[in-house]
Amino acid sequence: MKLQERKPELDLDRISVAKPCSASWDEMTGDERSRLCAGCERQVYNISALTPMETRDLIASHEGKRLCIRLFKRTDGTVITSDCPKGLAAYRRRVTRFATAAFASILGLFSVSYSQTTFPSDIGSGQRGVTTLMVPLVEGRVIDQNGAVIPNAKVTIKTSTGKKIVKTTDENGRFQFLDSRLIGKNSIKIERDGFNVFVDIFMSTAHERIDYCVRLEVGMLMGDITILPPPQIDMRSSDITTTFRVN
């Protein structure tokens, strides 16, 4: 009896961009799902605007052909598709509530006195306030494009004398610098693998508090698609499969 040949379902997280392209997505014509690149006259497909099923159908229809995509991945390697924000909504609300409660508790422990401030509507610009401290206080919170906090992000402040002070965000995505060397003109850089880098320049003085709420966008790759090879075949299995490959 001849066993029926079947293809395994494509693991979207094994997709990567073989040849990154520097073309600007914003300069292409089309919609959020696909746009035409004037440089190479090829259609570029935005995976983050497609469902997993649509993405698999797209790749299947281009088997043996070149396929250009716009791809976003989280730090854990997960490919972002159109259904991802829905699945993260409840988690984002829980994390945001927890982070806010934890921050209020920290302020109580430190007993830092400052004028009441709120996070700015223009995320990325430090919100300024006044403290009773003799040195500048620079702190903030780092979140992703879905509002979830980002722990272990590297935060570097370069002072006016060229000295670099480096810290990482905690489990609530928060960071804090309390240092006399911050008096004057400084630059701040926030980076995390898989995300675009945030950079800002600010002036600070004694008795001043600067609060940042920074949203890091997931790093984007665009170019020809490639699919990593599947795990080694288990010889104990009797299933017969074929390897799905896109050139």
Image (cartoon, rainbow, N blue to C red):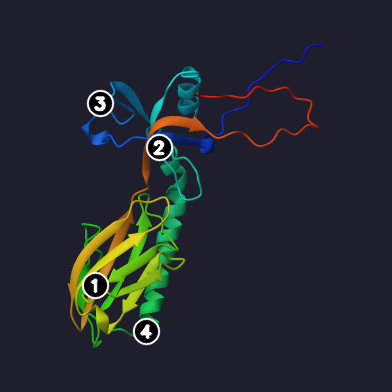
Say left or right for 163 vs 122: right
Q: Which residue is mark 1?
A: 210
Q: CA distance from mark 1 to mark 3?
A: 43 Å
Q: Is tag 3's residue or tag 4's residue first in the polypeptide sequence? A: 3
Q: Is residue 206 above or below residue 186?
A: below
Q: Which mark is residue 71?
A: 2
Mark 2 surroundings within 10 Å by alpha-carbon count, few (fewer than 14), some (14 through 19), many (20 or more): many
Q: Is tag 1's residue or tag 3's residue first in the polypeptide sequence? A: 3
Q: CA distance from mark 4 to mark 1?
A: 16 Å
| Viewer-side residue, 171 vs 241 | 241
Can you give x and y, in whole percent of width and height, for residue 225 in the image?
Answer: 45, 30
Mark 2: which secondary structure?
strand
Q: Residue at point 58% right, 24% down?
A: 244
Determine contact: label 2, label 4, CB under 8 Å.
Answer: no
Say left or right for 14 vs 71: right
Determine contact: label 4, label 1, CB under 8 Å.
Answer: no
Determine contact: label 3, label 4, CB under 8 Å.
Answer: no
Q: CA distance from mark 2 to mark 3?
A: 19 Å
Q: Which residue is mark 4?
A: 110
Can you give x and y, in whole percent of width and height, for residue 39 in the image?
Answer: 25, 26
Can you give x and y, in whole percent of width and height, for residue 49 in the image?
Answer: 37, 33
Image quarter of residue 18: top left
Q: CA distance from mark 2 to mark 4?
A: 43 Å
Q: Which mark is residue 149?
A: none
Mark 1: which secondary structure?
strand
For the N terminus, the image quarter is top right
Mark 1 surroundings within 10 Å by alpha-carbon count, few (fewer than 14), some (14 through 19), many (20 or more): many
